[in-house]
Image (cartoon, grey):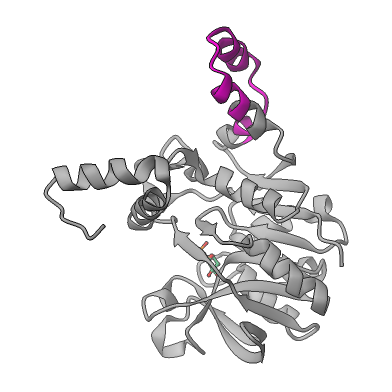
Amino acid sequence: MNIRKAVIPAAGFGTRFLPATKAQPKEMLCVLDKPLIQYCVEEAVASGLTHICIITGRGKSAVEDHFDRNPELEALLEEKKKDDLLKEVRRISGLAEICSVRQKEMLGLGHAVLAAADYVGREPFAVLLPDDIYDCPVPCPRQLMDVAEAKNASTLALGRTDAEGTKKYGIIKPRPVADRVYQLLDMIEKPGPERAFSDLAILGRYVFTPEIFDMIRETPPDHRGEIQITDAIRKLVDHQDVYGVEYEGDRYDAGDKIGQLEAILALALKREDYREALLGLLKSHGFFLKE
Ligand code: G1P
């Protein structure tokens, strides 16, 4: 199995961030010094994925522009001798072979992934959701790709969650097969604590065999009218083994306002160029932290 392509769904309304997302794509919201979508693209590239398809929709052109060349800006930075910024701006547009596909109606995550079917063809591929920021010694998609390649099967990122998490995430029924690796027996999208099979949640990173597209086509919309990727994976399990890997590293759910704040603080505390300044600011506001 040779996995080259990544699909990044970025077509949602971003209602959890309103009013910030009224006229701006959620994926362009900044965490520290870069937009969410850039974390995602960089993670895909660091995993060895060379071809990236971003699923966009109306009002999302800033996402496409972010990865395009900007000759006027480059000329200005060159003239002002801002070499580091110029290098960074050029690096972003050269990160990978990036294209975008428009999802004309927002009918759920499964529907968004299906929009990439022509682009992907009959190859295995990765899906990365920009809400989740991963900071792992081995990039999360790479951790999945290693298992997917060994098993020749779809493989998802899993993490432990609590009762609240069972209302936010897809939850799986696991069969342990190796250290941190599980075969998925079943799964339910956002089941709530009463119906949850386990405390293992599906957390925004997937590697799929191309048969997932056939399953999505057969998946009816749920009670909210959305075609859920979790329902399509549930169907896939009837035809092929599907695995999950408990990822190693840190993950931040920047998909809502408090999660975004947590991601900003946690990443700033890890970074030398922000840490001292942040601790200083917190102290000046009367917070006393252990250092
Ligand atoms: C989506 C998936 C869900 C998964 C979550 C991970 O939900 O449908 O299964 O657990 O991403 O972040 P959403 O956050 O789009 O509601």
Image quarter where the N terminus lies is: bottom right
Can residue 38 be seen?
yes
Q: Residue 112 at what x, y percent from top left?
A: 65, 56
Q: Name the quadrant containing residue 236.
A: bottom right
Q: Residue furthest left?
A: 286
Give the magenta-colored segment's residue range.
Answer: 64-88
Q: Residue 225 at what x, y percent from top left?
A: 55, 65
Which is more toward the observer, 217 or 52? 52
Q: Is residue 230 magenta?
A: no
Q: Residue furthest top?
A: 79
Q: Residue 240 at what x, y percent from top left?
A: 80, 82
Residue in view at x 57 percent, y 75 percent: 158
Can residue 21 be seen?
no
Q: Is residue 22 left or right of residue 244?
A: left
Residue in view at x 78 percent, y 48 percent: 50
Image quarter where the C terminus lies is: bottom left
Q: Is residue 73 magenta?
A: yes
